[in-house]
Image (cartoon, helix red, strand yellow):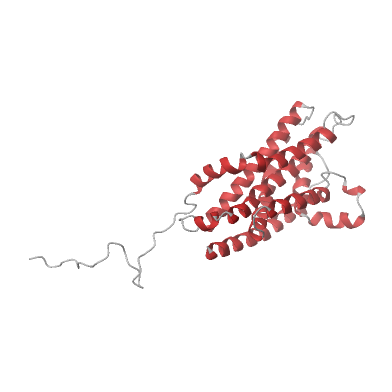
Amino acid sequence: MPTATRKENAPDEALTSTGRPECPRVKPLQGLGSLFRHQFRHTVLYPGLIGFSVGLPLVMYFMFGASQSYSTQWIGHANVACAVMFGMGAYGAFLGAASMGAQVGVERGQGWSRQLALTPVSVHTNFVLKILLALCGALLSLLVLMVAGSLTGAHAQGHIWVVVPLLILAGCICAGTMGIMTGYLVRSDAAYSIIGGVSVIFGFLAGAFLPLDLMPSFFRVVAPYTPLHGIYSLSQWPMGSGEFNWLWLVNIGAWTAVCCVVAIWRMRRDTERG
């Protein structure tokens, strides 16, 4: 006769101290790979999302950087055409990253965030996913402009073609978090309109379209505190445009931290409502 028997009504799963079934532990970044592959095709490669962030900087480069009388003049480690190319590239990458992040506004309107809340995908996993997609959008815009520049007279020393894009992409984490924050603060397509409008304003205040010296004093005072200013300045510095300023990194870091905190806070609230 057995010394111990199993109760007929004993549950198969483990129980917690409260008597509820123990929830399986979610692995860090669980589901990130499959979600990235799916959304990459539907966001980064979607012409409607990348057209403006690629087309506008390209047109601006051809207007002010390529085939101008001053394009072949060297300013340090690159010629003027290359400096304009990377300046427009910083603006296009910022716009591309922010637009990818703002896609969450449309997803929320379609109920995607509520569906995602029913899966093991955590808020932090979804946040990392959006940042990766934002950086892909920035990289695509930047690569198109670099190819066009290399074919139309943009020249620089070898290290410039590596260092400057890396600095721009690192700075675009700020743009991605700003887009995500905007997408969670404003529903639907309104996020795109806001991102597009403020990006143009930030482009002017960064000096991408017009030298800051030609602007009124008020705008010159405000400009260093805008998010694109630090990214644009970093894109020009390796080519020999002035001395390095640590405030550029403070600018990028502060904007990234604020937008990141607000974005994650809104993502958690949105998940709770779902």
Determine the image quadrant of residue 60: top right
Residue for point 68% across, 35% down: 143
Q: Is residue 207 in sight in this rendering?
A: yes
The image position of residue 11, as x and y in percent, is 27, 65
Give the vertical position of 49 relative to 17 (above or below).
Answer: above
Q: Which quarter of the rendered picture does the N terminus lie within?
A: bottom left
The image position of residue 59, as x and y in percent, is 79, 36
Q: Residue 106 or 244: which is nearer the viewer?
A: 106
The image position of residue 262, as x and y in percent, is 64, 62
Residue for point 30% across, 62% down: 13
Determine the image quadrant of residue 7: bottom left
Residue for point 57% across, 65% down: 269
Relative to residue 220, is residue 263 drawn left or right?
Answer: left
Question: Farthest residue toward the bottom?
Answer: 18
Q: Is residue 158 in sight in this rendering?
A: no
The image position of residue 18, as x and y in percent, is 36, 73
